[in-house]
């Protein structure tokens, strides 16, 4: 009797775990190799207030059908809730609601005519289903043309600069389209954290006989008669291999890739993610879950009060606040001592709530991760690698390939299902 195919998966984020589950369901011998000591990737969790919480803020949109189907398959649909949290903007030192057409029309920092244009353009982007109509232009140029120069300078420009820094004027319009088109007012979350989904997937894999190799770093990948993976924990041979690392990382690991392939696909910029998480003994913002910051001078680009979304009782009464950034991976903040970061960030919170005091902070955490946000420029789509690589039996699937959508669990699950099906049928 023929032995089942041996397939390796590098990376135990949502993409790697979903694909591994599909391989196991198809009767393949599966090995998952992960450098970190736990599964989850950019959705890895930690304990705060006695509960699991993601290191970097996460939620779902109503349009996220693929991950919702996976949650149901994992038996966690009962734990998925859909509140409608408050989304606001800080502009000129004032909070403005920005989550409905009425909010847009009430946004007084813009002249009324520009508010109407902004709302009309947002409605168009919600209805437009073909992002290809928007290729070849930047978000900045499109916003200035259709929403108006004032709308860009007051509203969208500060957000793009806060997130993308020097690349703000180069971000492609299809990326901006996806942020507006896919967003929903109700947001989804698994009570108890997305950790529950990842733990369930790992449990299902282990029950199916899959081998989970955590705390194992890949050193090299090469392919001849089979696929060879050299790791910190020894060498592995597979019939097929799915690599879910960033493309840049794959390029460093893969041996004997053609120069033409490298020159076309070993390109593009990424920012890292930086997250400060505070457990407070009282509420920071009265209602707001997500605060976009348009005012200059803040060391973070957004404030996300998670417990204005999920109840504080889930975290032993702590009020959980994220202070988030995307930064060049060379930015000193990513390596700044923890105490310096906390001092700088908590000082800025008085501009959010003048009553804030450091004594409110019960616990604090600082996390940083590389390759968290691809920089989607106008020619970005020309450098997205195909899933089949030049190495026989080696496939690549990662965040860089979800274009025009941005980072998100849903798009990773969708890609995992698609690539796994292709590999199974190969």
Image: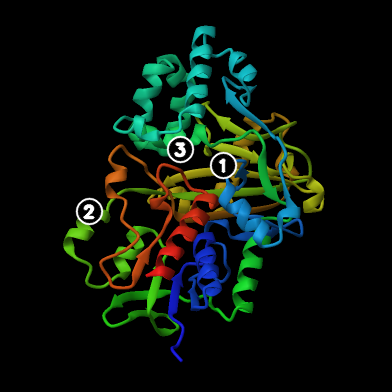
Examine the image and state in which quarter residue 249 appears.
bottom left
**Residue 255, position as x, y percentages in the image:** 26, 73
Q: Is residue 195 something that shows in the picture?
A: no
- In the image, 192 versus 239, the foreground residue is 239
Q: Which residue is mark 1?
A: 344
Q: Which residue is mark 2?
A: 264
Q: Residue sitting at 73 percent across and 31 percent down?
A: 287
Q: Which residue is mark 3?
A: 163
**Is the residue 371 above or below the residue 128 in the image?**
below
- Residue found farthest to the front: 1
First in sequence: mark 3 or mark 2? 3
Q: Residue sitting at 82 percent across and 49 percent down?
A: 313
Q: Residue sitting at 50 percent across and 77 percent down?
A: 30
Q: Is residue 261 left or right of residue 149?
A: left
- Tell me whether the residue at label 2 lies in contact with that at label 1, contact meaning CB atoms closer than 8 angstroms: no
- In the image, 266 versus 348, the foreground residue is 266
- In the image, 337 versus 46, the foreground residue is 46
Q: CA distance from mark 3 to mark 1?
A: 19 Å
**Residue 87, position as x, y percentages in the image:** 64, 31
Q: CA distance from mark 3 to mark 2?
A: 26 Å
**Residue 374, position as x, y percentages in the image:** 39, 47
Q: Give the secondary structure at mark 2.
A: helix
- In the image, 350 versus 398, the foreground residue is 398
Q: Which quadrant of the rendered structure holds the C terminus?
A: bottom left
**Residue 348, position as x, y percentages in the image:** 60, 35
Examine the image and state in which quarter residue 403 appears.
top left
Q: Give the secondary structure at mark 3.
A: helix
Q: Is residue 285 left or right of residue 198?
A: right
**From the viewer's perspective, is the residue at label 2 or at label 1 nearer?**
2
**From the viewer's perspective, is the residue at label 3 or at label 2 nearer?**
2
């Amino acid at each position: 009797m023929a032995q089942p195919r041996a397939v390796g998966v590098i990376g135990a984020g949502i993409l790697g775990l979903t694909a591994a589950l599909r391989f196991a369901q198809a009767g393949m011998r599966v090995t998952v190799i992960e450098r970190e000591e736990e599964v989850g990737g950019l959705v890895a969790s930690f304990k705060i207030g006695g509960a699991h919480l993601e290191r970097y803020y996460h939620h779902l949109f109503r349009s996220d059908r693929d991950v919702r189907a996976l949650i149901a398959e994992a038996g966690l649909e009962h734990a998925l809730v859909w509140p409608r949290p408050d989304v606001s903007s800080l502009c000129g030192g004032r909070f403005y609601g920005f989550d409905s057409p009425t909010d847009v029309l009430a946004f007084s920092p813009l002249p009324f005519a520009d508010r109407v244009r902004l709302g009309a353009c947002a409605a168009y982007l919600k209805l437009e289903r073909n992002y290809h109509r928007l290729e070849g232009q930047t978000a900045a140029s499109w916003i200035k043309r259709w929403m108006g120069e004032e709308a860009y300078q007051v509203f969208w420009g500060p957000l793009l600069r806060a997130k993308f820094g020097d690349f703000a004027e180069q971000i492609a319009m299809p990326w901006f389209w996806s942020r507006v088109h896919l967003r929903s007012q109700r947001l989804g979350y698994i009570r108890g954290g997305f950790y529950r989904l990842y733990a369930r997937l790992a449990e299902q894999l282990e029950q199916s006989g899959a081998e989970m190799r955590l705390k194992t770093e890949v050193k090299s990948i090469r392919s001849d008669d089979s696929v060879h993976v050299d790791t910190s924990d020894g060498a592995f041979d597979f019939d097929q291999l799915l690599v879910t690392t960033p493309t840049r990382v794959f390029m460093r690991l893969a041996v004997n890739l053609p120069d033409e392939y490298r020159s076309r696909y070993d390109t593009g910029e990424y920012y890292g993610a930086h997250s400060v998480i505070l457990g407070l003994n009282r509420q920071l913002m009265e209602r707001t879950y997500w605060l976009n910051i348009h005012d200059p001078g803040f060391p973070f680009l957004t404030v996300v009060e998670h417990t204005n979304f999920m109840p504080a009782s889930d975290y032993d009464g702590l009020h959980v606040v994220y202070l988030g950034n995307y930064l060049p991976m060379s930015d000193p903040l990513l390596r700044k001592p923890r105490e310096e970061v906390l001092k700088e960030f908590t000082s800025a919170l008085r501009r959010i709530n003048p009553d804030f005091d450091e004594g409110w902070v019960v616990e604090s955490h600082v996390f940083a991760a590389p390759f968290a946000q691809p920089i989607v420029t106008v020619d970005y789509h020309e450098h997205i690698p195909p899933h089949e690589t030049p190495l026989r039996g080696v496939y690549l699937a990662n965040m860089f390939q979800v274009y025009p959508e941005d980072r998100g669990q849903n798009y990773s699950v969708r890609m995992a299902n698609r690539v796994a099906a292709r590999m199974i049928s190969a």
